[in-house]
């Protein structure tokens, strides 16, 4: 290989290493991180500063430093959602760039740092080091996300609330992914410093971030080889089109647009078999007996949204082996109450307890791990219910499980609810099918405008004048 070819292949490996790290957060978890390019610059500067003293060992130390910086930055930002997270990471990238420009005593300011690479690997040795690290990163990522971990990541990406109610700690996942992705970015930056022999504030600029985002989108955001193919395209295509002079950028844009239009899953998706859909869990024929807490209790729970009391001083209890139904007109606070119990909403006052354990301030995933499962309104309840049952919760919160079901499916649901009670599980169910609720529930609780207006046996509650007026639509 000529020196130019070695340089080009090394550059592809560096970009791919940066892209593999970006796949962890952007691809697998669906979070738009705009600081990955700046973290590459952190790795480059760390290498340039440490190389005169430590030589080759400056590169792995730069990886550690960048990973730790990403970990510290991720701690406050990962609790943000959607575009707020993207803006926070963009602010982080801007701060890193400002530091590179203005802390001249350390970074050299606009002139950057030079003359540090004498003890760093060069040529074929650097190329071999970069590609060995890249191969290891691709193999590890492929192995990690091939099985149940990949299914959990997909659920966290596509249905984060459902993932939380299954005990998946999304914040912890994103924290680990951000730190690991930052470490890989640091490795790419360290290699970039060794390749170029100079580090300037451009290494932390937004152009690096754009290149990172482009190569992951073009190659494939979740395919193990997506970052490699995307890096090859990002590095080689401009080189091939430079003969077109000023028009090369337009041709590059057209080629990129063609990839996006005809390969929406990236280039890697064209050369690999389509991944089988996540296997749908089935409700087991035999339900194992429930274990854990014996009682779920609410005491004077209150929740306001603006000036509206969604839930006002609600108290109720649910024991294992009991089915309690929540009824009431739309907007009466039934789903809000389920959200408060499962941790998706925080109660303004009152207590929620599993036996003697107060859980009203606990995050959703921790409540789920303690034995409280939750389903959401859906056209079909079999798959989400089976997924929740796989975690063996002691208590189930079912939100309109009969919605959209035919008569035969309702009968199957009724039999399942009886099986859940026989297996010692406590069920709190919200539904508008008053006949189904009367047949399966031991008690009914009627809410109206966030207030309990009736509680007792189904026949007793249905005969209540307030219930007949507010929920059943019958004049008092």
Image (spheres, rainbow, N blue to C red):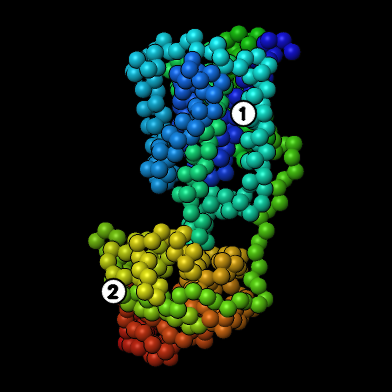
Q: Residue furthest left?
A: 307
Residue 280: image quadrant is bottom right
SS of the residue at dot 2? strand
Q: Identify the image quadrant of the N terminus.
A: top right
**Which residue shows up at 39% across the image and 32% down it?**
92
User: Is 25 positioned to the left or the right of 283 in the image?
Assistant: left
**Which residue shows up at 45% across the image and 15% down it?**
200
Residue 389: image quadrant is bottom right
User: Is 430 positioned to the left or the right of 28 in the image?
Assistant: left
**Which residue shows up at 48% across the image and 80% down it?**
320
Label 1: how many residues lie within 10 Å, few (<14), some (14-19) or many (20+)? many
Residue 300's tag is 2
Q: How much space separates mark 1 and mark 2, taking CA atoms?
A: 56 Å
The front one of 310 and 329 is: 310
The front one of 38 and 140 is: 140
| Dot 1 or dot 2, earlier in sequence | 1
Residue 16's tag is 1
Q: How many marks?
A: 2
**Which residue shows up at 48% across the image and 64% down it?**
368
SS of the residue at dot 1? helix
The front one of 118 and 320 is: 118
- Res. 152 visible in picture: yes
Q: Mark 1 touching mark 2, by CB under 8 A?
A: no
Q: Position of residue 243 (x, y in %)?
A: 65, 9
- Res. 158 visible in picture: no
Residue 319's tag is none
Residue 265: image quadrant is top right
Q: Identify the image quadrant of the C terminus.
A: bottom left
Label 1 or label 2, whichever lies nearer to me, is 1
Q: Position of residue 355 (x, y in %)?
A: 39, 75
């Amino acid at each position: 290989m000529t020196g130019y070819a070695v340089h080009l292949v090394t550059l592809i490996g560096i970009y791919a290493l940066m892209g593999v790290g970006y796949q962890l957060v952007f691809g697998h978890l669906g979070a738009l991180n705009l600081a990955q390019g700046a973290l590459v610059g952190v790795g480059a500067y760390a290498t340039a500063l440490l190389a005169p003293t430590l030589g080759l060992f400056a590169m792995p130390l730069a990886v550690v430093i960048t990973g730790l910086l990403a970990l510290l930055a991720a701690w406050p930002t990962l609790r943000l959602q959607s575009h707020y997270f993207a803006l926070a990471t963009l602010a982080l990238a801007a701060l890193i760039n400002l530091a590179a420009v203005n802390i001249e005593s350390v970074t050299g300011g606009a002139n950057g740092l030079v003359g540090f690479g004498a003890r760093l690997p060069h040529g074929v040795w650097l190329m071999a080091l970069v590609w060995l690290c890249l191969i290891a990163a691709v193999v590890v990522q492929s192995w990690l996300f091939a099985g149940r971990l990949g299914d959990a990541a997909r659920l966290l990406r596509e249905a984060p609330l459902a993932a939380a109610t299954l005990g998946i700690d999304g914040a912890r996942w994103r924290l680990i992914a951000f730190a690991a992705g930052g470490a890989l970015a640091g490795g790419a930056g360290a290699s970039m410093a060794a390749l170029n022999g100079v580090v300037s504030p451009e290494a932390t600029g937004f152009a690096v971030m754009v290149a990172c985002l482009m190569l992951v989108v073009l190659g494939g955001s979740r395919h193990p080889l997506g970052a490699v193919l995307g890096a090859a395209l990002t590095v080689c295509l401009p080189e091939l089109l430079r003969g077109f002079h000023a028009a090369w950028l337009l041709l590059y844009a057209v080629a990129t647009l063609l990839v996006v239009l005809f390969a929406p899953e990236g280039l890697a998706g064209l050369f690999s078999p389509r991944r089988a859909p996540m296997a749908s869990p089935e409700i087991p024929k035999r339900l194992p007996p429930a274990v854990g807490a014996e009682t779920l209790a609410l005491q004077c729970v209150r929740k306001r949204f603006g000036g509206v009391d969604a839930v006002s001083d609600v108290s109720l209890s649910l024991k294992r082996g009991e089915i309690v139904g929540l009824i009431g007109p739309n907007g009466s606070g039934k789903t809000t109450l389920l959200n408060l119990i499962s941790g998706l909403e925080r109660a303004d006052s009152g207590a929620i307890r599993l036996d003697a354990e107060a859980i009203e301030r606990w995050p959703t995933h921790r409540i789920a791990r303690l034995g409280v499962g939750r389903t959401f309104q859906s056209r079909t309840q079999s798959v989400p219910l089976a997924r929740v049952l796989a975690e063996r919760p002691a208590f189930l919160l079912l939100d309109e499980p009969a919605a959209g079901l035919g008569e035969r499916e309702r009968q199957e649901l009724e039999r399942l609810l009886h099986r859940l009670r026989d297996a010692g599980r406590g069920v709190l169910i919200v539904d508008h099918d008053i006949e189904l609720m009367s047949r399966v529930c031991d008690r009914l609780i009627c809410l109206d405008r966030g207030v309990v207006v009736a509680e007792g046996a189904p026949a007793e509650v249905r005969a209540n004048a307030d219930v007949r007026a507010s929920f059943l639509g019958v004049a008092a």
